[in-house]
Image (cartoon, rainbow, N blue to C red):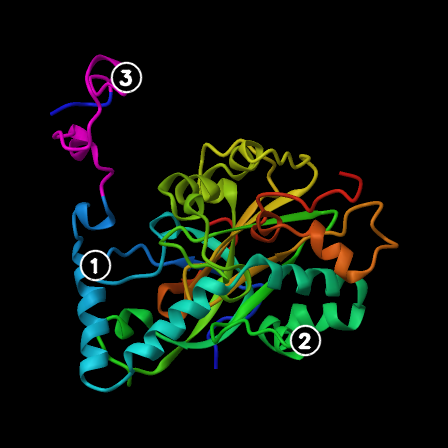
Amino acid sequence: MAGPDTHSHDHGDHSHGHDHEHDHARTFQPDIEDKPFSHYQVMAEALGELLIDSGVITADELRQQLEWLDARSPADGAKLVARAWTDPGFKKQLLQDVNAAAESIGLSAGDIPIRAIENTPAVHNVVVCTLCSCYPRGLLGLPPDWYKSREYRSRTVREPRAVLAEFGTVIPKEVEVRVHDSTADLRYLVLPMQPKGSESMKADALEELVTRDCMIGVSLPRSPRA
Amino acid sequence: MPRFAVGDVVRVRRAFPPGHVRTPYFTRGRSGIVDAIAGNYRNPEELAYGRYDAPTLPLYRVSFRQADLWPEYDGPAADTTIVDIYENWLEPAEEGQ
């Protein structure tokens, strides 16, 4: 089979009519279906079909749920953080019950309870799920691929400072690094410290400083001068 | 009623049962401190097999010193990992065990 190296795109040495057999057909990029279909994919497909066939949910309800999940984004989490920075009452509410705080400003965090964990001058928090990929999807969207990787899952609990440094985040030795392994029924959202120089900014401008990664805890919010 | 209170020293059972288990290996047999009681939840070890009528269990946030989890840990002594662990995996322990 012609590999990329032997497949010449220099067509100068032969006529380039559209009727000749062209071996582009041999270099297709694989489609999703060309990868092995895993046991769990089979089970997920089967479960979806059974739920629909037995009338528990409709195909449209399943589609709607996927659409809702795909439409979540870190912008929702950023709204909560920026509001907490500018409104002490809201911050208190957020630290007590993230889902209720989100609902109070018209956002839906989903049904799974989410806890906010607050960074302070003495503690830097970072979130991992060592078992799989538990993540506050309702507020941050789908987790990044690295969050699900074995590297991140195994090393974040074992050498968190080295992992953070690879993200460009160096935490001083006098600050406790506190790793949260979300293996059970709760999900975690890091409430970062408000960056210096942003004290006079309004909530909607502050939202721009709050990145996905700083709410996972692998990074810090953007600096207002950057 | 939760069996343990915030501040109690607890040890994760050193057990290796088959099936769906949410207690990470690296905590088995290790001691930590109850940081918070997260409420009562259904036991995922039962839910995984479709048993929805089993009683709920208290879920604890247990804080481990990194040095107690990883003997080779070379970061500051104050660094910790908090893991969510269901009550059936915890037993009372003494400080320093």
* Residue B35, magenta (yes or no): no
Please indicate whether residue B21 sits to the left or right of residue B19 in the image. Answer: right
Q: Amino acid at mark 2?
A: Ile
Secondary structure under tag 1 reads: helix
Picture coordinates of residue B86, whole percent (x, y)? 40, 68
Above or below, A51 relative to A10: below
Give the residue at mark 1. A40
- Foreground: A75 or A190? A75
- Foreground: A73 or A194? A73
Q: Amino acid at mark 1?
A: Tyr
Q: Amino acid at mark 3?
A: Asp
Earlier-in-chain disc, 3 versus 2: 3
Chain letter belonging to callout 2:
A
Q: Are marks 1 and 3 on the same chain?
A: yes
Q: Are marks 1 and 3 in contact (CB under 8 Å)?
A: no
Assess disc 2: are there few (<14), some (14-19) or many (≥20) residues with their C-alpha within 10 Å of its C-alpha. few
Q: CA distance from mark 1 to mark 2?
A: 37 Å
Residue drawn at 41 percent across, 59 percent down: A183
Residue A168, quarter of the rendered image: top right
Residue A10 - label: 3
